[in-house]
Amino acid sequence: MQELYSDEITGETRNELAEFVKWFNRLFGHEPLIVGGWAAWAYHRGIGSKDIDVVFPGSAAMDRNLVAYYTARGFSQRKTEMFDYAFYKERKTKSGTSVEVMVDAVASNRNVTVTGTDLIIPWGLAEKHKQKFEFSKDVEAYIVKPELLLFYKAGALIGRSHLLRQATNKGHYQSKLWKDAKDVAGLVGNCELDAVELQQFSTQCNFKQADWQYVLNVAQTYLDETEKKAVRDSWKKLDLL
């Protein structure tokens, strides 16, 4: 799976992320809120992302802002499983590789309904638990805090594992699950996670120890032995298992 997230491929999305953040700053005078793979990268500095995941303060703001952005930048639109909209376009790397750059957007008044479960993770929590991060010179945005990001990643692992069972294009979900698992391992390995905050989010989102065990079981399919042990030991220490 590593080749699907090479620097050559994710670099195209990172360039678009920089343009998106600068455009947003220039037109609206404030920073967008980034979640998902690029928020995880901000903490672990490991594998980049093929998507730009962004949370807007409301549906009206999202519709107005993104319509302007994707029109200006030549994007097309489609629906996705976790977000309200995805805007995408094809780009070519220096070597000629075709890359699909995608901007996934959701309004903060929506929830992540985890496929196959009754778990719900509000996107509105991201607005309350965020911090600024400078992706590069003059490219500053908000990112969701690592404790909450772990929940979004856990929800993605659970939901996509259920979708994988009935999918015809299993490779798509396997690559997403691999990336989610690597992001979870990266967060655990590079962040001092707050046990109290994690327990509060567990209560708010109705996550039980059995749910965390399920997430661990799914993630371990895609992790090496060192990563498996680090995640398992960390979650025991944080009383998630």
Image (cartoon, rainbow, N blue to C red):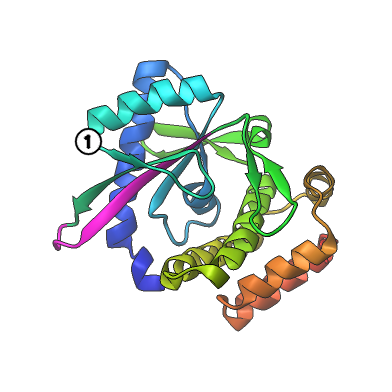
Q: Residue at x 53, y 66 (%)?
A: 177
| Left or right of residue 83, residue 172 in this image | left
| Left or right: where 160 falls relative to 172 | right
Residue marked by disc 1: 74
Magenta stretch, main secondary structure class: strand
Q: Which residue is found at the position 45% from the left and 68% from the top?
A: 175
Extreme bottom residue here?
A: 225
First to last magenta residue range:
94-106
Please, is residue 183 above or below residue 101 in the view? below
Residue density around tag 1, few if under 14, some if 14–19, many if 20 or more, within 10 Å = few
148 relative to 64, above or below: below
Residue 176 is one of the magenta-drawn residues: no
**Position of 48 relative to 72 (above/below):** below
Task: Choose between 202 and 94: the one closer to the eye.
Answer: 202
Image quadrant for the N terminus?
Answer: bottom left
Query: What percent of the width, then of the height, locates residue 60?
Result: 49, 20
Q: Is residue 184 above or below residue 59?
A: below
- Position of 37 with respect to 94 (left or right) is right
Which one is nearer the viewer's eye here, 25 or 158? 158
